[in-house]
Image: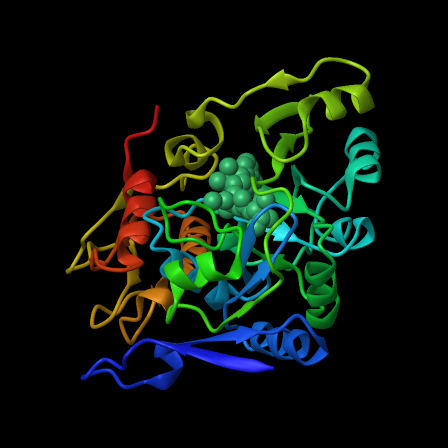
Amino acid sequence: MVTTLGRTPHPINNDAALQMTEMLAPDTSGIARAAALLREGALVAFPTETVYGLGADATNALACARVFEAKGRPTFNPLIVHVPDLATAETLAVFDPVARDLAQAFWPGPLTLVLPLRMGHGLADLVSAGLPTVAIRVPAHPLAQSLMRATGRPLAAPSANPSGRISPTTADHVVQGLRGRIAAVLDGGPCKVGVESTIMGVAPQPVLLRAGGLPTEAIEAALGHPLREDTTPGTVQAPGQLASHYAPRATVRLNVTKRTAGSFLIGFGAIEGDISLSHSGDLVEAASRLFAALHSADAQGKPIEIAPIPTTGLGRAINDRLSRAAAPRP
Ligand code: TXA
Ligand code: MG
């Protein structure tokens, strides 16, 4: 069964697809519809045992960019990738023996592991915000499991709330925050755990990055020793910290409308460059190409120049990332 929760259509923008969010029932046809939307690159919120996730095909850069747009996130925080089982996770990330033991002990369940990306992983750059690592989790919720298997793609999913608001534990919470900004919500009733997953880094030493739904004591019992904590807010989430993992080697100059001889120009809209983030000036497209553009610019070994990017919508996150890339190096 599908019901449609509409906003009163805006008098100027009557695009029904933008105004509507489908509420999908937790049955075979609801799951099939959700999977089809995800495979097309649309956003679908789905229940996990912790909180509702805002799902996108993690291999589709545009879909991942839409996640940041829908949430109104001012920065590109890395997203957690959801897969149905350990075997699928091993195609995306490199597991050492400790990581594999933890996965076997606690997956499926509310534990997220931050691991090195595997060569040929196929994930969009935006998922890991340009880092060489990826956060992976295998949710236990049966609907999440059915949806991942029906979609056949890894799903990037932050909590399904607007940035800075409370995480959603019912489909109604999701709709209140994101109605009209996502294609659909798969309604699985209230989430059991109600807080986000516990996040751990594994290499070189196991470390707790975010306390969450899996108690630390359970992890320590599995490890056989106390777990070091590194949950200071700056450590994982601060974009400054994340930025230090990837800054181009070349100098970066922003808001360039006229190129300097010998530079490599990343264009946007009317400003043509050696490459363009978006010829049509589309900020979602620009976000989806940002990290790849910085990588290919850096490979040229020339000073990098970047056309002005508007500071509206996803432009805020793009400019945040660019100003970090342009900041003086230590
Ligand atoms: O329970 C949960 O974990 C929920 C459900 C939907 O699965 N998801 C969730 O996602 O809480 P989100 O986007 O709120 O959490 C992402 C956080 C980032 O802010 C960062 O702290 C950490 O995961 N993270 C992701 N990738 C990382 C990486 N490569 N290195 C370090 N931290 C990472
Ligand atoms: Mg969140």
Query: Is residue 1 left or right of 86 when viewed as pictured?
Result: left
Image spot of residue 194 (x, y percent)? 57, 43
56 and 308: which one is in front?
56
Where on the picture, by quarter, is residue 117?
A: top right
Q: Is residue 190 left or right of residue 257?
A: right
Point 27% across, 52% down: residue = 316
Instruction: Give the farthest residue toward the left.
Output: 258
Colour scheme of the rendered structure:
rainbow
Residue 189, x across and y down, in percent: 60, 59
Comparing 177 with 40, the one in front is 177
Q: Is residue 228 left or right of residue 162?
A: right
288 and 149: which is toward the camera: 149
Q: Position of residue 81 (x, y in %)?
A: 62, 51
Instruction: Kindly indicate the quadrant of the structure image that contains residue 266.
Output: bottom left
Q: Quadrant of the N terminus?
A: bottom right
Residue 131 visible in the snapshot: no
